[in-house]
Image (spheres, rainbow, N blue to C red):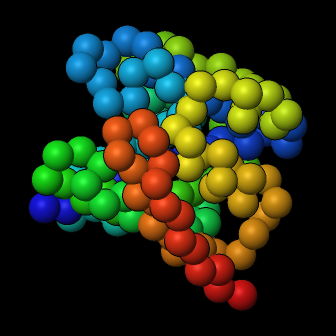
């Protein structure tokens, strides 16, 4: 089976808005710092999903820009996750309380010192370096990253 999802890194020019996943029981991301996002709903484009998830989780109205796609084979039992990665530099509004965790603006140089998925270090660097559009595969066994493959498109 396949699950389609988005992850969005909201960038204010010096920090990313990060979500510390500390509120949901039985959360595969529990304790980790990640971008905001979620599962695509039926009939929704990835960009529509990203904008909806950003609004629901942060209260911000945003213009997400697609930067790449990452495949996570068997990230959860019997489920491959195909995740659309977005970066947001245009947004407006006031932050709200998120029911999935704590939102915090994290300076670029501190993002990778937070507890994240190991592979996040790789693609967050790509976002910071403004790499071209990418298609990647990150293979995990539990929390351990086993393999990474990527193609960049000019």
Q: Is residue 81 above or below residue 93?
A: below
Q: Position of residue 64 (x, y in %)?
A: 58, 56
Residue at (31, 60) in percent of width and height: 73
Q: Is residue 24 left or right of residue 59?
A: left
How far from the left and from the top, in percent, is residue 45? 34, 65
Residue positioned most to the bottom: 154
Give the x, y percent position of residue 47.
45, 61
* Image-based side of 93 in relation to 29, left or right: right
Quadrant for the N terminus in the image: bottom left
Can you see residue 46? no
* Count of numbered circles in the view: 0
Looking at the image, residue 80 sits to the left or right of residue 21; the answer is left
Identify the residue at image location x=57%, y=74%.
150
* Image point (34%, 39%), residue name: 142
* Image location (x, y in percent) of residue 146: 46, 54
Of 62 and 12, the residue lying toward us: 12
Visible residue check, residue 45: yes
Name which quarter of the figure residue 101 lies in.
top left
């Amino acid at each position: 089976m396949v699950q389609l999802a988005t992850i969005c890194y909201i960038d204010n020019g010096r920090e990313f808005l990060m979500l510390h996943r500390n509120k949901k029981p039985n959360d595969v991301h529990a304790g980790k710092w990640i971008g905001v996002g979620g599962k695509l709903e039926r009939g929704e484009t990835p960009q529509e999903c990203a904008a909806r998830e950003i609004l629901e989780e942060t209260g911000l109205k945003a213009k997400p820009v697609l930067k790449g796609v990452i495949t996570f084979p068997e990230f959860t039992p019997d489920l491959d996750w195909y995740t659309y990665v977005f970066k947001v530099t245009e947004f407006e509004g006031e932050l709200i309380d998120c029911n999935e965790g704590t939102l915090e603006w994290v300076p670029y140089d501190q993002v990778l010192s937070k507890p994240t998925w190991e592979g996040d270090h790789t693609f967050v660097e790509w976002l910071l370096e403004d790499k071209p559009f990418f298609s990647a595969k990150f293979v995990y066994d539990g929390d351990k990253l086993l393999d990474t493959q990527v193609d960049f498109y000019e």
